[in-house]
Amino acid sequence: MNSPCISICVIDAETGYCHGCFRTIDEISHWATLPDADRSQIIYQLEHRRQELAPDSNS
């Protein structure tokens, strides 16, 4: 399973999420050794994080 990294690697101090892929530093550092089931779960969570942190498009 490919990494969701998009080469915008900056960790937000407030949320702890990467600005590019929305993973935590632990998720990023362990990605290569995680089983596919764990990676799939993280990928699922990333979409929720993006939606949660996305600016309101109706403003």
Image: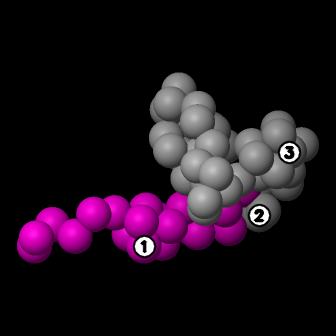
- In magenta segment, residue 56: yes
Q: Which of the two discs, 3 and 1, labels the residue nearer the N terminus? A: 3
Disc 2 marks a residue whose amino acid type is Ala
Left or right of 50? Residue 16 is right
Residue marked by disc 3: 30
Residue stretch rendered in magenta on the structure: 39-59
Q: How is the image coloured?
A: one colour
Residue found 10% across the figure and 70% down from its top: 59
Q: Residue 58 at what x, y percent from top left? A: 10, 73
Residue found 53% across the figure and 26% down from its top: 7
Q: Residue 32 at what x, y percent from top left? A: 82, 38
Residue marked by disc 1: 52
Disc 3 marks a residue whose amino acid type is His
Q: Main secondary structure of the magenta part?
A: helix
Q: Residue 3 at what x, y percent from top left? A: 63, 39
Residue marked by disc 2: 37
Q: Nearer the viewer, mark 3 or mark 2?
A: 3
Q: Quadrant of residue 38?
A: bottom right
